[in-house]
Amino acid sequence: MTMTPELSATLADLAAPLGQDGFVFARAVQIAQVLEAEAVAGWDAFAASWHDLGLDRYMADGGRYRRRRHAVFSVSAAGARRKQDQPHYQSRDYNPLNGGIARWFTPIDDAIAQSAPMQRILGQCFTLFSALTDPKVSPASWHVEAHQFRIEARPDTDGKPTPEGMHRDGVDWVLVLLVRRENIASGMTTIHDMSRNPLGSFTLTEPLDAALVDDNRVYHGVTPVSPLDPGLPAYRDVLVVTFRRE
């Protein structure tokens, strides 16, 4: 049987509230400790790749405010293996706006998929999420999707990080990691229980701030973003990683 590595002290600090409440707001200093030196050293090149994302042409609301790239992995104790490119699919039960169709997005560049930040993020998520999953159902390898998102805000159009509203993703675990905020206001993350009662809210403001969510237990959403200075570019860059049992 594959053994999950023991949680580090920092991961244990995140695991406690995530296991208890179904979500946790992880501050940048905690995530930096999790990523460690090699991944942090490669962060600038990793973050720069968000300047080269393809337009999301599947927005049922007609919006042109979202850019993204996508990749699929199998992640186990042995590491992260990239799978053949495949579409992103959500049923309308989970995404009433854009669900129900196979959506093909521009693939994440191989150099970014294999970079130290991405590989460390996937590996540490595997350790954390496996530790919090019932051993009776915890898989040796997880089906993982990684999404690079840029949400653009314009003077006449707010950017919508979650245009489908408060939602679940139809997976087991979700990481939302802030890469950059540029000239935007708002973008507050809100968490609700299964009866849609509010549980908490926070705003990812610093690169490496993160939200970790148990998708089986809570809903999450993010409020629209608007430009602070309408004459300058305004956007919110995040990496979203989802883990689902294969």
Image (spheres, rainbow, N blue to C red):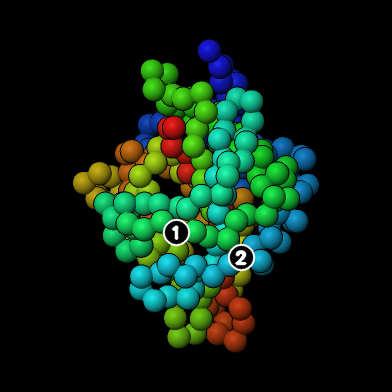
Residue type at mark 2 is: Leu
Q: Quadrant of residue 61?
A: bottom left
- x, y percentage for residue 64? 47, 76
| 170, 23: nearer the viewer | 170
Query: Label 2, label 1: how many angstroms apart (C-alpha)?
Result: 15 Å
Q: Is residue 168 left or right of residue 73?
A: left
- x, y percentage for residue 6? 59, 20
| 82, 239: nearer the viewer | 82
- x, y percentage for residue 190? 37, 55
| Residue occupying the point 60% across, 87% down | 231
Q: Earlier in the sequence, mark 2 or mark 1?
A: 2
Query: Where 3 falls versus 98 (above or below)?
Result: above
In the picture of the structure, the residue carrying the numbered disc 2 is 53
Say which element carries label 1.
loop
Comparing labels 2 and 1, the label whose residue is closer to the camera: 1
Query: Where 60 falls versus 188 (above or below)?
Result: below
| Residue occupying the point 44% across, 81% down | 157
In the picture of the structure, the residue carrying the numbered disc 1 is 103
| Residue occupying the point 61% across, 65% down | 53
